Amino acid sequence: MSLLVVGTVAFDAIETPFGKTDKIIGGAATYAGLAASYFTKNINLVSVVGDDFPQETIDMMNSRGINTQGLQIKQGEKTFFWSGKYHNDMNTRDTLTTDLNVLADFHPVVPESYKNCEFLMLGNLMPRIQMAVIDQLPNRPKLIVMDTMNFWMDIAMEDLLKTIAKVDVLTINDAEARQLSGEYSLVKAAQKILELGPKYLVIKKGEHGALLFNKENVFFAPALPLEDVFDPTGAGDSFAGGFIGFLAQTKDISFENMKRGIIFGSAMASFCVEKFGTESLIDLSQDEVDNRVQEFVDLVQFDISLV
Ligand code: AMP
């Protein structure tokens, strides 16, 4: 059961109330691939970097079961660079820099050996590139999950709407759901967004958890109350990676199983925010993942008998 992950592989510079980093490894596909690697080992990456990107990071991805044959390395060019600064609430941030670099002229090539993937994670990236990947697959995957952000709503809305129409699950945050739908109420926003094509919508609310909608149902999962949150960067991508990794592992795309997927995704996001960058996703043990998921179960379990 293979999982194809597309998205940025990047350098990030991050400032939070707890510290500041120079260029560290980031990128939507990096976070999503690493998070998914705790559930399934058959992960294929499509992305692009410049020749400034460290080989040891590629080796680390390989060692976690991420195949990088579809990672283009452009000689003489620079890797995508993003920098952001978080506000004191750690839930909102300002983007300071988005240097597309190698992304500006990226034409994704899906290797032959990736083409029969059953699960496709379209991590945050230009919508036209996300679409170009769908177009190269001879058979439609069993499940396509797409993540995006306000940046693309601002500059590529037309391409974004075309791509959204092709996917099964869209994951965005609450502010983006409001921007995309023009509705303040998240319930109304979800109804409007589901009219655009996806069968499911996940609205991420940072430290306030996540909502899963389809046309008939809604499910809510809290975020784990954590003692220390150092860096929320990549939480959304880690969430998406854990979610689709779990679905690929269990091969069950029912609403009931997606509810479990939301918990596994939330668990991976909770690890992500505890350290800067991708550091916390590199070397978790199975016990750590299991215990974290159990903490979610304990957090929301209660008995009520109504007379
Ligand atoms: P998240 O915190 O889940 O929104 O993801 C942050 C990651 O997304 C960072 O590691 C960035 O490198 C990457 N990123 C930031 N802006 C963009 C963008 N416009 N397109 C794709 N990836 C981006």
Image (spheres, rainbow, N blue to C red):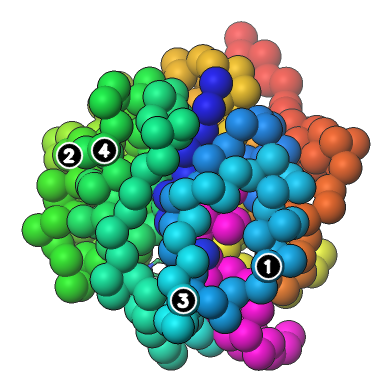
**Residue 197 locus on image (x, y percent):** 18, 35
SS for callout 4? loop
Q: Earlier in the sequence, mark 2 or mark 4?
A: 4
Q: Is residue 104 above or below residue 281?
A: below
The residue singled out by tag 4 in the image is 136
Q: Along the horizontal axis of the image, is 221 left or right of 55?
A: left
User: Is residue 31 within the magenta segment?
Assistant: yes
Q: Earlier in the sequence, mark 3 or mark 2?
A: 3
What's the distance in space between the residues labelled 2 and 4, CA to CA? 17 Å
Q: Along the horizontal axis of the image, is 120 left or right of 207?
A: left
Give the foreground label among 3 and 1. 3
What's the distance in space between the residues labelled 3 and 4, CA to CA? 25 Å
Determine the residue located farthest toward the front in the rendered image: 75
The residue singled out by tag 3 in the image is 75
Identity, as a three-letter code, of the amino acid under mark 1: Gln
The residue singled out by tag 1 in the image is 55
Q: Earlier in the sequence, mark 1 or mark 2?
A: 1
Identity, as a three-letter code, of the amino acid under mark 4: Gln
Q: Along the horizontal axis of the image, is 66 left or right of 120?
A: right
Q: Residue at x 68, y 53 (%)?
A: 61
The residue singled out by tag 2 in the image is 165
**Residue 89 locus on image (x, y percent):** 58, 77
Q: Earlier in the sequence, mark 3 or mark 4?
A: 3
Give the foreground label among 3 and 2. 3
Give the foreground label among 3 and 4. 3
What's the distance in space between the residues labelled 3 and 1, CA to CA? 13 Å
Residue in front for this viewpoint, 233 or 193: 233
Give the foreground label among 2 and 4. 4
What's the distance in space between the residues labelled 1 and 2, CA to CA? 36 Å
